[in-house]
Image: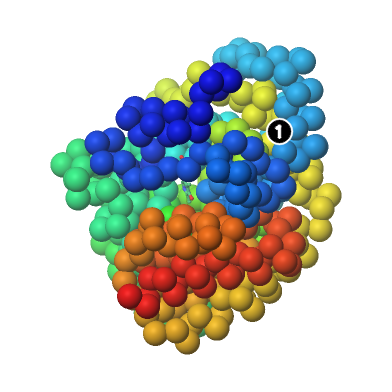
Amino acid sequence: MTATTTIADLQAYDRAHLWHPYTSMTHPSPTRVVVEAQGVRLRLGDGQEVVDAMSSWWSAVHGYRHPVLDDAARGQLDQMAHVMFGGLTHAPAVELARRLVDLTPPGLEHVFLADSGSVAVEVAIKIALQAQRGRGHRERTRLLSLRGGYHGDTYGAMSVCDPVGGMHTMFAATLPQQVFAPRPPAPGGDVEGWAAAVHALVERHGHELAAVVAEPVLQGAGGMHVFDPECLRVLRAVCDAHGLLLVLDEIATGFGRTGALFASEHAAVVPDVMCVGKALTGGYLTLSAVLVTGAVADAVSDSDSGVLMHGPTYMGNPLACAVAGASLDLLVSSDWAAQVAAVSAGLEDGLRPLAEVAGVGEVRVLGAVGVVQLDRPVDVERATAAALRTGVWLRPFRDLVYTMPPYVTDGDDVRLITDAVRAAVLGEVSG
Ligand SMILES: *Cc1c(COP(=O)(O)O)cnc(C)c1O
């Protein structure tokens, strides 16, 4: 931004030329300019400072401009910003892999570094298909996933997203046709009935299925649905009985968000393949990872090509790996579990009373995730404006006003967030 570029200029050019996520170019929805971010606050173009209740789409768990993460990025810049990963390696990637292998459930010991969550899911799908070929099952080419799920926006990932809420309708003709199990029940719901439905599907399709793909315990962008952890044990048992790989997508849930370091730990289930992303770099840079067991790595190596057929240009980007390593160190050396529990208690206090409000369907709190589901779609612009007047950045979708604050958000700021959610919700239901 040159000295003469005003906030209004930025907004005008943005409006005319830049696509934003899931928006129209020709009829864009409003955007606000952010000029700076610090701690849990964003400073907007009009000078207002607001608490970021979204953690930049669930990533900035330590808050903005954290000195440790800033130092990691600067320190790495003095070594090298990037170098290709084909035939070369470097300390930031190796040290990150070591941390990931140590932190994730036992058995997950091989790491593929990818550029984003969606790409991690693509790689996980390739791994599942190649592993089945390695085991002599070329016919196992389909995937079973869950209704209500979200796994990213690229083609393979889209194919395992919820077939109604996702983008299946528009792309149906060109998407791989997967098999969908019903949405798993909320905690205390009919797990047995759900398990019977899953068993029936796998009895019918098992011979053509390579893997089950699921988000553990919290289905995020597909509807912020919390389900009974017992369902993960059902999936593990079904996979074992029918020779399927269990792929758990921890991109949203990983690194403490749900109160466990990984959401699969709520059920003590270890997947064959795990995807992580989002909070991996503390919200600094795009990076994801796919972790697999030794058995899966062996099976991939037994497939026709003998190699894993993927390799992004920016694979293992040293800057991103250095920041991710620092972010994981920061996480494990902090009392993240107590922080998440404190945020959770604050969300529970502030949001639970909204369950009594007419027009509110349900309030759900899990770890540092607070969700208010309405009985109608949210007017995103009206709800956003109401939250901003309270001093908070919220980004509702569908019928959901929700928050995933940074873990470092203090009690006063959590209260500000729940006040903002309340203001946004009341603005929606009182019309
Ligand atoms: C966000 C998300 C993805 C996609 O990650 P991107 O980095 O946006 O590509 C995949 N799976 C889950 C569960 C997610 O929440």
Quarter-wise, where is residue 412 in the image? bottom right
Image quadrant for the C terminus? bottom left
In the image, residue 106 sits, relative to residue 377, either above or below, namely above
- Residue at 79%, 42% (x, y): give it: 329
Q: Quadrant of the N terminus?
A: top right
Q: Residue furthest bottom?
A: 356
Color style of the picture: rainbow
* Location of residue 10 in the rendering, given as x and y in whole percent from the top left corner: 46, 30
Q: How many marks?
A: 1
Q: Give the amino acid type for the residue marked by disc 1 in the picture.
A: Val
Along the horizontal axis of the image, is 416 left or right of 185?
right
Q: Is residue 412 above or below residue 157?
A: below
| Residue 58 location (% of width, % of height) | 57, 51
Say left or right for 398 vs 93. Answer: left
Closer to the camera, 3 or 64?
A: 3
Viewer-side residue, 142 vs 180: 180
- Left or right placement of residue 385 versus residue 173 in this view: right
Any atom of ligand 1 within 8 Å of the CB at mark 1?
no
Query: Which percent across, then down, holds residue 194?
Result: 38, 74
Residue sitting at 44 percent across and 78 percent down?
A: 362
Name of the residue lying farthest toward the left: 173
Reading the image, the residue beneath label 1 is 323
Which residue appears at 45% of the width and 84% of the height? 357
- Position of 127 compared to 101: left or right? left
